[in-house]
Image (tube, rainbow, N blue to C red):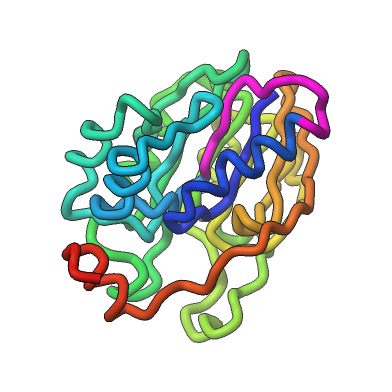
Amino acid sequence: MILVLGDVHSRFDLVNAQTDHAEARLGAPLDAVVVLGDFGLFEPLLSRFFRKRGMRFMRPVFYLEGNHEDYNALPRLVERYSDVMTHLPRGTIREIAGLSCLALGGAAYMDSLVTPMGSVITPADIERCLTHPPGSAACVLSHDCPAGLGVPSTPGFEHIGPPGFAGGDDVRAHLLPRIWLFGHHHRWFERRVEETWFHGLVESWQGYGLLAPDGAFTAVSNEIPVPPKPSLRCRIASWLGIG
């Protein structure tokens, strides 16, 4: 069984907290954990959790990149922390707990603040997905959703237009996955398009999904209280080691 988490936003402790909850619910250990982007990959926060505190995840963790990562340092961070978690590059297929999964990190462009250079899904990313043979991925894991799926706009971002990235339906029609999971929009969502079930997930402190080897998906609400984010001034001071 795979634990699937939406946006983590650098609250890395939540991965083990939701793992504990899921394993108590199942009465058995999980095979793996997947984070659907916005893990919050920033060197000071990663270093504090994994190196200074010596923390480790309870189960193997696989992750996509979202739009809230340090893209200037992303290749270096992926390599530096490969001993504690495994990155799933865009357009690649990986078998996780017996399920063939296509990874498609990144997001549709929103604005320069929330979709930095490198985070935007490009036509080349879509083409890379389409090079795989039809039926080769039973599951698609993405951060954003395909355009036209009907996911409601996030409050405050209505001016950007309907959510989703172009080319997603081409990927669905080519690969014909049984299930497609995404985060980014911070809400539960479910819709079937022909033979594919789409599921959107809430943020990781509000719940998680359980994904079985046959592609069956169960949404689980489990809210974990999290402290408010510190001010930008406090975060910068902490990163510099002066706070």
Residue 145 at least partly seen:
no
Q: Position of residue 172 (x, y in %)?
A: 59, 38
- Residue at 40% x, 30% y: name it: 85
Does the magenta-highlighted stretch encompass residue 209?
no
The reply, left or right, for residue 87 in relation to residue 59 is left
- Quadrant in which residue 136 is drawn: top right
Q: Is residue 153 left or right of residue 39?
A: right
Above or below residue 100? Residue 216 is below
As drawn, 133 above or below 55: above
Q: Position of residue 124 (x, y in %)?
A: 30, 43
Residue 101, how many percent across, how many down?
54, 26
- Residue at 42% across / 36% down in the picture? 55
- Asked if residue 101 can be seen in this view, the reply is yes
Q: Compared with residue 17, is residue 188 higher up or lower down, i.e. above or below?
A: below
Residue extent of the magenta highlight:
24-35
Is 34 in the magenta? yes
Q: Residue at x 69, y 21 (%)?
A: 29
Quadrant the C terminus occupies: bottom left
Quadrant occupied by the N terminus: top right
